[in-house]
Amino acid sequence: MSVDDDEIEASRAPLMDHLVELRSRLIICVVAIVVAFIICFAFAAPIYLFLLHPFQMAAQMYADSKGGEATGPFDLLFVLIGLKEAPAATGDLRLMFTAPLEFFFTKLKLAGFGAVVLSFPVLAWQVYAFVAPGLYKRERFAFLPFLLAAPALFTLGGALVYYIILPFVLWFSLSQQIMGAGIAVELLPKVSDYLTLVTTLLLAFGLCFQLPVVLTLLGLAGIVNSEMLWKGWRYAVLGVVVVAAVVTPPDPISQLLLAIPIIALYFASVGCVKLIELRRKKEDAAAGTDVALS
């Protein structure tokens, strides 16, 4: 029996022990979510104000353009990437709710979304701790980096949404207003609709940024290889462009801002899968040498 088989044999336990462990880990996950929900709900108003910052920046840029300053989509993009100074915030930003408890339920939704994000490290660790005994030692070490890479890439996608995509989308929405001739078609978003927009974009970008994690795991499992990914890069680029067109507003700049990073991450994933294949060849060669010597 090999060393790996000895590890699996030593990790076996009766079904009841697995169920008891699963129950205890589920209880920890539920407690973590509840605690995170209470914390997020207690600070729901400051969190919501934090999420309104991109809207405030977009509204100020739009107000400057109406005040005679030359402000277009590229000027906004230069501000967002730090090539131009952001305008000073002036005036009030107005949102509305039309039902008595609408903002209360909006804060509940915000707390629920924030609870999952805040408790994710605990949830991910509990999942890993439950499945780790059934993995080989080398598989456990190979799986750990993905616990760090997944939240890091999700945070990167969320930062792209918060600092670039949302301000541009909201500026574009404000530019569709009609003012004059006794008519005002004005953007007054509901608090619930704004939260839906923010969470939808955060989830869409955060999940799209998980592409390297997914492809690398598939490479570890032997489902895909670097040659297959490299030969299919044209179809991958087409798929990324289609996804970007679906999950972003109908303007080319925001679509490019999603498509370009995802395409870059795809080619980075090809490199990661290639490195996995090279390491696997070295391990197989070393194992073959050991068998030959024995």
Image (cartoon, rainbow, N blue to C red):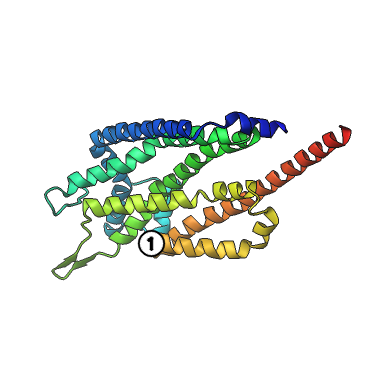
Instruction: Please state which of residues 18 and 288 is positioned toward the viewer in this rendering.
Output: 18
* Residue with the most extreme top position: 10
Q: Quadrant of the C terminus?
A: top right
| Residue nearer the viewer, 121 or 255 | 121
Identify whether 206 is placed above or below 121.
Answer: below
Q: Position of residue 250 (x, y in %)?
A: 39, 65
| Nearer to me, 253 or 25 | 25
User: Which part of the image, by quadrant, shows the N terminus?
Assistant: top right
- Residue most extreme to the left: 100
Residue 46 location in percent, x, y? 26, 37
Packing grade of label 1 (10 A; few <14, some 14-19, many >=20) is: some
- Place residue 30 in its image quadrant: top left
Q: Residue at x 11, y 49 (%)?
A: 100
Total numbered labels: 1
The one of 58 and 232 positioned closer to us in this rendering: 232
Question: Callout 1, which amino acid?
Answer: Pro
| Mark 1 element type | loop
Task: State left or right for residue 40 relative to residue 141.
Answer: left
From the viewer's perspective, is residue 223 above or below residue 231?
above
Residue at 68% from the left image edge and 34% from the top image edge: 4
Please give the residue where the numbered disc 1 appears in the rendered image.
249
Residue 115 in the image: above or below residue 244: above
Q: Is residue 3 left or right of residue 128?
A: right
Side of 195 where 208 appears, left or right: right
Write the residue at 52% across / 61% down.
240
Asked if residue 137 can be seen in this view, the reply is: yes
- Residue for point 41% across, 37% down: 120
Q: Is residue 91 visible?
A: no
Residue that lies at the very extreme toward the right in this rendered image: 293
Measured as percent of width and height from the top left, residue 264 is found at 58, 53
